Image (tube, rainbow, N blue to C red):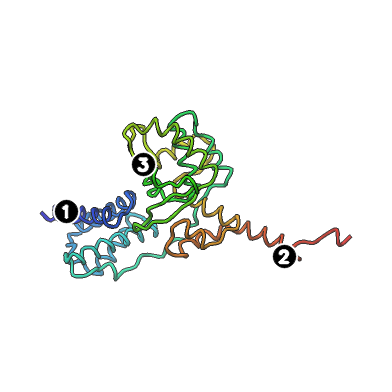
Amino acid sequence: MLKEIQTKMVLNYIDYLTYQKHYSHYTVQNYKDDILEFFDFLERENLDYQSIVYSDLRFFLMYLKEVKKDMNSSIDRKLSSLRGFYQYLANEGIVSSNIFTLISGPKKEKKLPRYFDYSELEMLFNVCDLSSALGQRDRLILEMLYATGVRVGELVSIKVHDINFDNRSILILGKGNKERIIYYGEYCADILKLYLHHGYLSLNHKNSPYLFLNARGEVLTDRGIRYLLDAIIKKTGIQKNISPHMIRHSFATHLLNQGCDLITVQKLLGHESIKATQIYTHVTTDRLKNVYEHSFPRAKIDFKEKE
């Protein structure tokens, strides 16, 4: 009976995240996995989710760290998921308070964002077969991820009527159901035109409003995007893993390296806080060195003057 109640609570919370908070499928699935893992832990330890105390949480942390060998970043995410879940339970009157506010996660490892060099991105672009509908779609996915820096959940939610073809902009529904405008350039515009006039017409036999469709004419999922990106990189000689977020990192990194200011990058990425964008500043070292050497009068010796 208890297990049924817990399952119903989790499902209600998942519905809340999906339909009221408008979280992406990928984020919601992570929340669900984290909560179910915690309930499994409680069951093994014969603990009641409504009466757990601080020491129980410390024991859970020890289990994640020493038994499961989870990384600090993973532990921190799980605590965040459970903190949100228990706040929901407190708001619904199911628990008296959110006990997870009493505990903080371990210090995160400073993990620098991985990104592609521009030459590597060109290799990815050139793999796609533009004579086929799926090849045109895949090329557009790559071009649009790189041209706009959108999250994968935002990408799969794009509808054709969200696109303003005159000024090459797209209305995006981002995190927290917040809208923003993103822009794309000429390369992306050319592939978009090709896809809409050929590949899209072939794939859209169900009259879907969504831009990116699978072979059955249904909207692509974020998991589907990740799967096809894995297939694309295997056709190249690039020895790197690939993810939509890695292309997003590339977008931000390349903008900063070309002199774009941090506030603009923040707005384009849809970050609420500038702190989330500052992680990219480490990769601008090459540009800073180049600017210094070309701008500071005594950065280099002028051998012609010495002669």
Is 208 in front, or is 12?
Answer: 208
Q: Quadrant of the C terminus?
A: bottom right
Sooner in the amino-acid sequence: mark 2 or mark 3:
3
Image quadrant in which you'd find residue 302: bottom right
Three-letter amino acid code at disc 3?
A: Tyr
Q: CA distance from mark 3 to mark 1?
A: 32 Å
Disc 2: CA contacts within 10 A as few (<14), some (14-19) or many (>=20): few
Label 1 sits on a secondary structure element that is: helix
Q: Residue at x 49, y 34 (%)?
A: 128
Is residue 205 placed above or below 97 in the rendered structure? above
Q: Nearer the viewer, residue 307 or 209?
A: 209
Pointer 3: residues within 10 angstroms few (<14), some, or many (20+)?
Answer: many
Q: Residue furthest right?
A: 307
How many numbered circles are shown? Answer: 3
Reading the image, the residue beneath label 2 is: 296
Vertical side of 47 occupied by 200: above or below: above
